[in-house]
Image (spheres, rainbow, N blue to C red):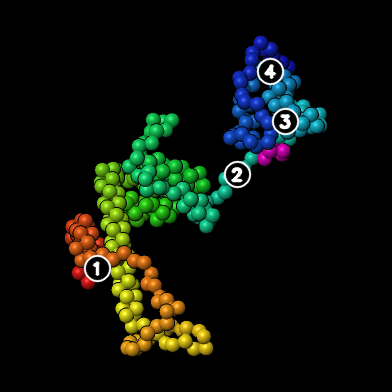
Amino acid sequence: MSYQIINVNETAKVVPLFWGDCAGKGKPADWFTEFQLSLPATWSKTMKIDQFSLQLAAGSQADEWFVDLPAREKTDMATLKVAFLKRWPPTWRPKWTRTPQQQECIRALKLEEEEIGKWIETAEGGDYGHILWATKVMRLAMSMGDVEGKLIKYVVEEAPAILWNELEDKYDDWEEFVEAVRKVKVKKVLRNKEAKRGEQELWDKVAELYQQISQMVICHATQNYQTKMAWHPTIEGTTMAYWSQQTRPGITPPQTAKSPVAPPCILLTQTQFLEKASTLPQHANTEMGRRLYSMKVT
């Protein structure tokens, strides 16, 4: 006959209290495993059950559940584990299926353009924003079971244009993708960002000049119509003024009538317009530069 040696002086390792409301970061099943590993092997069944009750936060859902638990389910750790996992069942990772939900989940981790080439401090020391993004996306995808990199193409599609231009359309696995992002030359990306910002400022100036020219055309057309306005005498006590395409010489408008006033506008002289145009930078020998030059000469 064998006897179990009980060492009451041996203490259990410290583990966090269990609340049972799933508000913590850990999973209940993982907590129970951690609790079992904290118990000394030399403790008796009763000592382990008593220690379990002390690990439940007072007044919590877990504490109330344990109080109401039948005694037959608290005889040892084996029966207690069955009851515990019945109350807090473990969450099983779904099998990888490349569903639309998984695609949308991976697309949701967007990389902002201002994060590219920007150093971001982290608990591990820090790294560039686009590298941290690639690592985070890889961990999320692999946690969903995509160990073969099936979701990489959706990540590349959502990348900002200045980073997308530096990436390939296909990678064999996530490690290769993250390594490709890590090898992107930061200085080149930053130059591309500045070039894009300069092009946007150029387009803004072109739009401003186009608006000024449009206003000049409207004001000129309004003044031409005013010179062709004709007045007619009073009809049944009502003075009527209307636009006509021909002048009516010899007709004097009544003193009580007022001529329509043209809407206020700001006219640019030719000199002023040329001064505005001279502020634009030289057009580069690119597709956008040729388009801007074509707009200017036409």
The boundaries of the magenta stretch are: 85-89
Q: In which quarter of the image is residue 80?
A: top right
In this image, 273 relative to 106: left or right?
A: left
Query: What's the amino acid at mark 2?
Result: Trp
CB atoms at circles 2 and 1 under 8 Å apart?
A: no
For label 4, the residue is: 43
Q: Residue 208 carries which label?
A: none
Crowding at dot 2, Cα within 10 Å, few <14 / some 14-19 / many 20+, comes out as few
For label 3, the residue is: 60
- Percent position of residue 18, x then y: 66, 29
Query: What's the amino acid at mark 3?
Result: Ser
Image vertical order of residue 110 relative to residue 65, above or below: below
Distance from disc 2 to disc 1, alpha carbons, whole Å, reads 61 Å
Residue 214 falls within the magenta-colored stretch: no
CB atoms at circles 4 and 3 under 8 Å apart?
A: no
Looking at the image, is mark 1 or mark 3 earlier in the sequence? 3
Looking at the image, is mark 4 or mark 3 earlier in the sequence? 4
Looking at the image, is mark 2 or mark 3 earlier in the sequence? 3
In this image, 27 relative to 56: left or right?
A: left
For label 1, the residue is: 295
For label 2, the residue is: 92
Residue at the (49%, 54%) spot, across then down = 103
Q: Could you say which is closer to the camera, residue 290 or residue 72?
A: 290
Q: Visible in this render: residue 128? A: yes
Q: Visible in this render: residue 291? A: no
Nearest to the eye among marks 2 and 1: give it: 1
Looking at the image, is mark 4 or mark 2 earlier in the sequence? 4
Q: Could you say which is closer to the camera, residue 239 or residue 130?
A: 239
Residue at the (51%, 47%) spot, across then down = 144
Q: In which quarter of the image is residue 89?
A: top right
Crowding at dot 1, Cα within 10 Å, few <14 / some 14-19 / many 20+, comes out as few
Q: How many labels does the image show?
A: 4
